Image (cartoon, grey):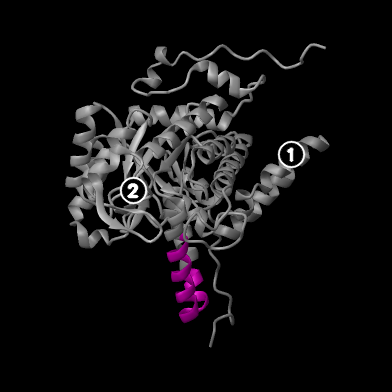
Amino acid sequence: MKPMNLPPPLPPDWSREARWNGIQRPYAPADVLRLRGSLQIEYTLARVGAERLWELLHTEPYVAALSAMTGHQAVEQARAGLKAIYAGGWQGAAEAHSARELYPNPNGFPSESVPHLVAGINKALQHADQMYHAEGRNDTRWFLPVVAEAECRGSGSLNAFELMKALVEAGAAGVNFKDQVYTVNTCGQFQGDVVMPTRVFLEKLIAARLAADVMGIAVVLIARTDAYGARYLENDSDPQDEAFLTAERRVDGCFGFRGGLEAAIARGLACAPYADLLLFETPRPDLREARRFAEAIHAAYPGKLLAYNCAPPLNWSKQLDAATIRNFQGALSGMGYRFQFVALAGYQSVSMGMFELARRYREAGMAAFARLHQSELELAHIAGCEALKPLRNVGAGYLDEVARTIAGVASGSRAAVRAREEKTRATAEWATVPGNTAK
């Protein structure tokens, strides 16, 4: 009996595509086709997102992104005009995962947590697009590229391979892999990290690239090193790390490691042939160190794209003056840092926003909520914020259109009535009712 599957596509010729200039693969196209299977499955969100992100990286001075913890946050970012979204692993650990627990690092939460977050973001963006498109409005680009942080319990190459596949299935356009050892993972912006040997990290990047190739998606691969703040190395198996070893040895067998900017540069140079962008985690916003890193990389790899996490834990106002903060991202862009993101923006906005509302509500009651409502009205008038339309934002009008289409009812009268009611409730200026004033 003849197989029913379609014939596999022709093998890719990476040497002929400008997209892969400077990228090395230690495997052949035939290996990709052998591992892909007989049927090529389409991953439209990941493909469109990766192509869009790559275009932005080469046409914009820089791509600025905030992290999102929920799909709703992502929708608001798209509505406000941002061009990319960051799905951080730390935020996945904090809440956005199936275990329904709070964890400080990847050791505790399920490995599907970040793919689950990315899928939720893309579903929310798709829903917003469907609603606006049904209304004949196409003035907002909803399908923003999502850059995900690859967090999982395992740190080996097979874990990287499977995690990249899961992220592509979820619709990730770019993925950020790092060289921390997950079994002892702490935040890369603090001291005391353990990093894996350089060779092991390179294998991890190769595995991630292979997975993307097998899926048929030109994922934007970011190599992040935490060598700046590292104080230990998992083992001394790679001669590339010898220059940074110290005599110290931990009880768990980890070797002392002399972290710092030179160690980060060495890691960046090693990763450059295998990643699309390079990122070094830094404990503070320092333009001089950013310039030194960029110059060292570009001396060996001219034009190599760089990424920068604009969320170091220290107080920016204490580190930099107002003018430097205002011009910080532009200065980074001039050095080649084309993707700049705030990794904790989603978490910080939710935490601070709710704490401030709860504090004011405890002190002033409904006056605090009335103040929030007034701010929403002002933002709706000035900038098009639609927070005052909760029913519309969850798709009530769109589902009315679906029901109308199924039933064959003439023009969407129910949707029109619902829209008028919501608009009246959200924007009415209530007149003072006699006798309705608190004594």
Find out whether the residues at labels 1 and 2 contact each other: C-beta distance under 8 Å.
no
**10 Å crowding of disc 2: few (<14), some (14-19), many (20+):** many
**10 Å crowding of disc 1: few (<14), some (14-19), many (20+):** some
Residue that badge 2 annotates: 226
- Tell me the CA gap for discs 1 and 2: 49 Å
- Please indicate whether residue 55 sits to the left or right of residue 130 in the image: left
Residue 304 image point, x, y percent: 29, 29
Label 1 or label 2, whichever comes before in sequence order: 2
Residue 202 image point, x, y percent: 39, 35
Prevailing SS of the magenta stretch? helix
Residue that badge 1 annotates: 402
Q: Nearer the viewer, residue 432 or 334?
A: 334
Up/down of 40 relative to 237, above or below: above
- Please indicate whether residue 212 sits to the left or right of residue 226 in the image: right
Which stretch is magenta?
350-370
- Looking at numbered disc 2 in the image, what kind of residue is underneath it? Asp
- Looking at numbered disc 1 in the image, what kind of residue is underneath it? Val
Up/down of 435 relative to 380, above or below: below
Q: Is residue 367 magenta?
A: yes
Q: Residue at x 25, y 44 (%)?
A: 263
Up/down of 105 relative to 218, above or below: below
Q: Residue at x 55, y 39 (%)?
A: 167
Which image quarter holds the N terminus?
A: top right
Residue 36 image point, x, y percent: 60, 23
